[in-house]
Image (cartoon, helix red, strand yellow):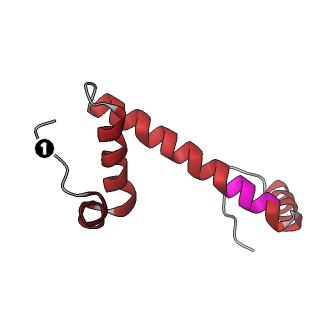
Amino acid sequence: MSTIYPDTHPEIEDLQLKLVRDLPAWKKLEMRAQLNQTAQSLALSGLRQRYPHAKNPELKRHLADLLLGAELANKVYGELDDDA
């Protein structure tokens, strides 16, 4: 079996993968939700740095661009005001 993480010893990687495979589905879903929340928090943090004067609604609209793509975000939320 090829390694997924080249910086991890193969036996440890096998153990990690086994532990994840053995988790109940609800726990895997919970972990996925936490990862998604963390990713959104990191993205919002980056957007706050990029747009330091933007208010939360504008930041969330920029986040929608990242998550959905500009075309779909425009269809769902309307055009993003470039003057902001």
Asked if residue 25 shows in the view, the reply is yes
Quadrant position of the C terminus in the picture: top left
Residues in magenta? 27-32
Quadrant position of the N terminus in the picture: bottom right
Residue 48 on image: x %, y %: 35, 31
Residue 71 on image: x %, y %: 24, 66
In the rendered image of this protein, does residue 35 appear above or below residue 71? above
Residue 11 on image: x %, y %: 85, 58
- Please give the name of the residue rendered at 81% of the width and 58% of the height, measured from the top-left corner: 27
Q: Label 1: state its secondary structure.
A: loop
Where on the picture, by quarter, is residue 60? Answer: top left
The question of residue 31 being in magenta is answered with: yes
- Please give the name of the residue rendered at 57% of the width and 43% of the height, measured from the top-left corner: 38
In the rendered image of this protein, does residue 33 appear above or below residue 71? above
- Please give the name of the residue rendered at 82% of the width and 57% of the height, measured from the top-left corner: 16
What secondary structure is the magenta-colored segment mainly?
helix
Residue 75 on image: x %, y %: 25, 66
Total labels: the figure holds: 1
Q: Is residue 37 left or right of residue 84?
A: right
Q: Is residue 11 left or right of residue 73?
A: right
Would you name the residue on which mark 1 appears? 82
